[in-house]
Image (cartoon, rainbow, N blue to C red):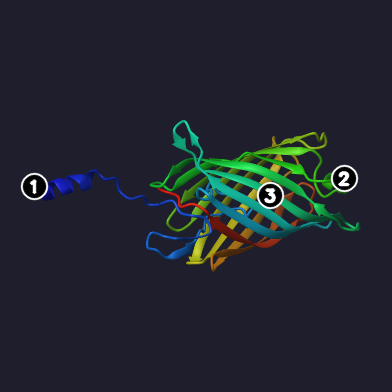
Amino acid sequence: MYALLLLAQLAKQPPPPLFPAHRRGLYKNAAGIEVIDATPQSPPLHSDDPAVPARGEYEMNFTTDAEYAKTAQRVNLLAVDLNYGTRPVIAGYKLPTQIKFEFPITASREAGEPYAVGPGTAGFGIKLKFYDDEHRGISAAFYPQVEFASGDAARKGIAEHGQTVILPLLVAREFHEFTFVFNAALDQPFHDPERHPAAELGVAFGRAFTRKVAGMIEFRSESNLSFTSDRLLFANAGLMHGVRHIVWYANVGHSVFADDGVGRTYAGAGIKTQIETKKERR
């Protein structure tokens, strides 16, 4: 009789998730083995995923990257990306949330001109992970952000005038062999009549090669809202390697198509580190 009751209780228990939630960066899997998160993410890519840091966890990225074209060059000598994970209660539901602040020290010039150096385009955002299905491996987040020129960056030509509100939707789908990420965003500039609303679309694929090495690639486009002008399509590849609780990353990419006919090359490298201040209860 006892055995029958035990079997009945086991039958009522839901099956374990096929794609259990995991931490960003380096984390321990269900077997207690330290592995790297191979989900396509920013950095090293431009595309981002819906994942957020654990509650009470700080995630910090320190990046040096560059965009080179014959007509202009831009180098972020140091871009500091600070993120904090929290879980506000909204309508009785703990919503996984990430608070982000980013600011770079940038050097920029047009062809033949000397570099102008100073604080570049800063950004603030809140990522809201509103959907997460661990059985199907699907998650989604809304990530509203605002970018603005810091200091006299706009006067120096280091950053755009005015502000830009960016409204991205991030979707991820996990498979056993790789992880797929889709991004769609609307960019709305303010206080700059020379800029117009733009659309961004991107897809990315990521896969772990070893326990602590992961590779990822993205294809991303930018254009006006009617997709008839200001068009740019580029490909970008990233590599991540975890060493002693720190993730080193690098990327390299190149434009595939641009309306102005100017080729662009992208490259960058940096480190990701995490500081956990609270143990999150599942």
Q: Position of residue 66 (x, y in %)?
A: 74, 59
Numbered circles on residues, count? 3
Q: Sort mark 2 into few (<14), some (14-19) or many (20+) by Cα contacts within 10 Å.
A: few
Distance from Cα at disc 2 to Cα at disc 3: 20 Å
Q: Is residue 114 above or below residue 14?
A: below
Q: Position of residue 48 (x, y in %)?
A: 59, 49
Q: Is residue 112 above or below residue 190?
A: below
Q: Position of residue 14 (x, y in %)?
A: 29, 45
Task: State which tag comes first along the sequence, 1 or 2.
Answer: 1
Left or right relative to 185: residue 175: left
Secondary structure under tag 2 reads helix
Left or right relative to 245: residue 261: right
**Residue at image mark 3:** 102
Q: Name the kind of residue labelled 3 in the image.
A: Glu
Q: Is residue 89 above or below residue 11?
A: above
**Residue at image mark 1:** 1
Q: Is residue 61 visible?
A: yes
Left or right relative to 37: residue 228: right
Q: Which mark is residue 155?
A: 2
